[in-house]
Amino acid sequence: MSAPLPSWNDGAARQALLDFVGAVTTEGAPTYVSPEDRVAVFDNDGTLWSEQPMYVQALFAVDRVRALAPSHPEWRGRQPFKALIEGDEEALRTLTEHDAAALLAATHAGMTTGEFSHTVKEWLAKARHPRFQRPFTHCVYQPMLELLDYLRGNGFDLHIVSGGGIDFLRTFCEETYGIPSSHVIGSSGKTRLEWREGQPVLVKLPSLTSLDDGEGKPINIHLHIGRRPVLAFGNSDGDLQMLQYTGALDGPRLRLLLHHDDDAREYAYDREAKAGRLDHALEVAGQEGWTVVSMRSDWNRVFP
Amino acid sequence: MSAPLPSWNDGAARQALLDFVGAVTTEGAPTYVSPEDRVAVFDNDGTLWSEQPMYVQALFAVDRVRALAPSHPEWRGRQPFKALIEGDEEALRTLTEHDAAALLAATHAGMTTGEFSHTVKEWLAKARHPRFQRPFTHCVYQPMLELLDYLRGNGFDLHIVSGGGIDFLRTFCEETYGIPSSHVIGSSGKTRLEWREGQPVLVKLPSLTSLDDGEGKPINIHLHIGRRPVLAFGNSDGDLQMLQYTGALDGPRLRLLLHHDDDAREYAYDREAKAGRLDHALEVAGQEGWTVVSMRSDWNRVFP
Ligand SMILES: [Ca+2]
Ligand SMILES: [Ca+2]
């Protein structure tokens, strides 16, 4: 058997992963954790795939707004629609997850969940990352794919816990990460049951019911999983509460933050970033001894 | 290997189950369903365990109200609290799932999810069914336990989808049914993240965020599972939409309703019942050819 995590350089981060997996899987050890409690949670944007120059879902929303604009003349005078239609690059760069959610709400209301999923899949198949010129699902991080496999092989129960929309995420998480839809948690909107063509379907409504960010992450982890994770991996301040919530005070637990410090191969951003800001969580990581993964020095490869 | 479903009598219901499992597991057959799509959903109250003379969770709420009443003098003049404190049997019998949810909200607000779970477990360990004089977790249906095992053995992905509170359900579903907390869906209330004793915890708030009944069931199935089930088993009008939502129009699917027609061994109730009413769904079952399971004639044994 080849060594695990080949795209990870030898170093503190890789060693922390190997040590933790060893500790929780060694039967009889005081640190042993039974498989049903080996819950591991992963943020998606900026942790499993690239979130720069803009959240992928925000790019999708932009394209949707542009596609739908001809039938919505009222958008021309209203932000953030106006900026998108006019291609205002500065406004686009400052889109928050909240803006993205608002845009999505405006652009998907009335679609069934099936139609929405179909629209996203079509878009993902054609859209390309503006810098890397490849599909967004190929802008996932090879070291993270290896980590998911490694944890899965050691009996971990993997879940995505993302600020992105749950229906958006589910269009690619199974194929891209091997994580089934029931293990994907995200922001969610209201739906209504309607009959169309002799079948009950769920129609997406414009209001958001859960923003899966900040304290929303532990709240949704409890709602969807019902267990405290033992491992959490994030990359921004929006993951702080999820990482804090991970593990019992006196039990084994591993908290990791990916630090984007690699402008050459991907991007470098942290405290000043508009999307994916990593500021307070980096402070806490230092105080608490969490594992900060440097993209530049801990990974010998970024994309598959 | 012994024959599956020993507590089920030979008959149309047992045969429908055997035929369906055979059809979806036969590789190469047009009815074949891959394991990740073999999602099966079960109502809990009245489908997996007894819901008479009152929902178990309502009985729990009653006991909580009585235990907390001394510190809530305002409850003495307010329904439904007044009825509970005074032991008004008629009012107790007409408690709806909504009332139960309201009572729970009033009685659990301020507790952490961990404290709530602990309180429920302590109560379940001591409480006894008023007629059967055994713990409620022993008032589960033996034929249904066999069905869960049979489906699990055939690669089905089992989920509970209950009107009961999700935190209440999770205290016993894993041990009693072998269904882990992440596969348990129920009604849920708001929670807030707070720090207590150096650890972030989730505190239960009084407002309900999702009533997992009626159209709430397909909505939550989509939110938590993200796939349409191929098998659904319920027992009341509250399960109608879940059964309708089950399966694609042209795909294999099995919809079942348990009909409580066995006053000798359990209870007999349907169209006139105050809790667990089965009226409109029974009509639709007849029109649509769903499988109606008669407790009296399809089961040779009721409890373990
Ligand atoms: Ca992120
Ligand atoms: Ca029921």
Image (cartoon, coloured by chain):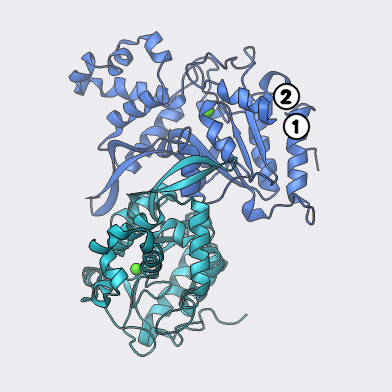
Chain colours: A cyan, B blue
Q: Find residue A259 and report its image quarter.
A: bottom left
Q: Is residue B262 above or below residue A237?
A: above
Q: Which mark is residue A230?
A: none
Q: Residues within 10 Å of mark 2 (few under 14, many from 20)?
A: some
Is A220 positioned to the left or the right of B185 in the image? Answer: left
Whole-angstrom CA distance, mark 2 to mark 1, is: 8 Å
Q: Residue at x 75, y 35 (%)?
A: B16
Camera-side residue: B89 or B15? B15
Q: For the N terminus of chain A, give its image quadrant.
A: bottom right
Q: Is residue A296 above or below residue B243?
A: below
Q: Residue at x 61, y 23 (%)?
A: B282
Q: Amino acid at mark 2?
A: Asp
Camera-side residue: A235 or A52? A52
Q: Is residue B179 above or below residue A64?
A: above
Q: Is residue B300 above or below residue B165?
A: above
Q: Which mark is residue B298?
A: 2
The location of residue B210, given as percent across then percent down, is 38, 39
